[in-house]
Image (cartoon, grey):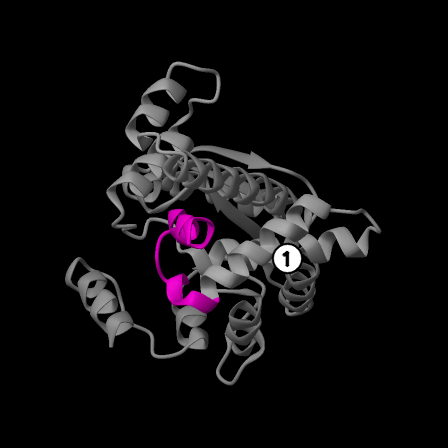
Amino acid sequence: MKASLFCDEFVKVGAAHGLTPSDVIQAADITFSCVANPQAAKDMVFGNCGVLLEMGQSKGYVEMTNIDAETSKDISEAIMTKGGRYLEAQVQGSKLQAEDGTLVVLAAGDRSLFDDCQSCFEAMGKNSFFLGDVGNASKMNLVLQLMTGVCLSGLAEGMALADRAGLQQKDVMEILSLTNLNCPLIYEKGNAIIDGGFPTHQALQHMAKDLKLALGMGDSLDHPLPITASVNEVYKHAKRLGYGDHDVSAIYIRTRF
């Protein structure tokens, strides 16, 4: 129902409504896909009435879902086998950055498709980077998400400790803002913790998904990620407590109680 309402809003401003992924591919020269997780991305391509049904020589497919490199390569191979062009174009940023058009786009795959999509990337983001072969953008995104997830877990744990020690959290944030720890992410999420509302700008469940994918990437490379593994357990517990749809700053609830 919610998705239908979003479609209605786009139709009001001139978009055409396709009932299936294959309908969209048939109607468009370049299709952008952004869904919840790797399995949903695969379903869009390989599922019933999926992308491959209408994919052809003149078509471009841009996958913007945060996925792992292996999934991206599987999709790329399928698209290219049908004669299409493929680009992974994952984004760094939250709902606020999306609304402001200040996302950072991380792209890899077909360079000509990247060039053709520049006007679209410029509309949604302040910078776009081409990182070479398919999979590189997925890997870069997971590295950055790992850093973000670990950072926010540390922020939440510190704010919880301050509260337990009898310190004012607003004082923590005021002092922090004067140090080299200050950055937009820390400021935004720290104030969300103080307010206690956790309005969703980046869902906690999506961060948990990306941490899991980052751990999988570490496993595939035989590279230890002990800090990420510990932080991943915190996010898993927060999801089990029912905070998956809340903002990622709701990780504080798990560290506080």
Instruction: State the residue at coordinates (57%, 43%).
Output: 107
The residues colored magenta run 240-257
Q: In the image, is residue 76 above or below residue 198?
A: below
- Residue placed most toward the observer, 54 or 194: 194
Q: In the rendered image, is residue 244 in sight?
A: yes
Residues packed near mark 1 inside 10 Å, few (<14), some (14 to 19) or many (20 plus): many
Q: In the rendered image, is residue 35 in sight?
A: no
Q: Quadrant of the C terminus?
A: bottom left
> Which residue, as the protein is rendered here, is positioned at the far bottom?
48
- Residue placed most toward the observer, 47 or 84: 47
Q: Which residue is mark 1?
A: 213
- Residue placed most toward the observer, 61 or 142: 142
Q: Amino acid at mark 1?
A: Leu
Q: In the image, is residue 238 above or below residue 181?
A: below
Q: Is 243 inside the magenta-drawn segment?
A: yes
Q: Position of residue 225 (x, y in %)?
A: 73, 46
SS label for mark 1: helix
Q: Is residue 141 left or right of residue 103?
A: right
Instruction: State the residue at coordinates (36%, 26%).
Output: 172
Q: Is 132 inside the magenta-drawn segment?
A: no
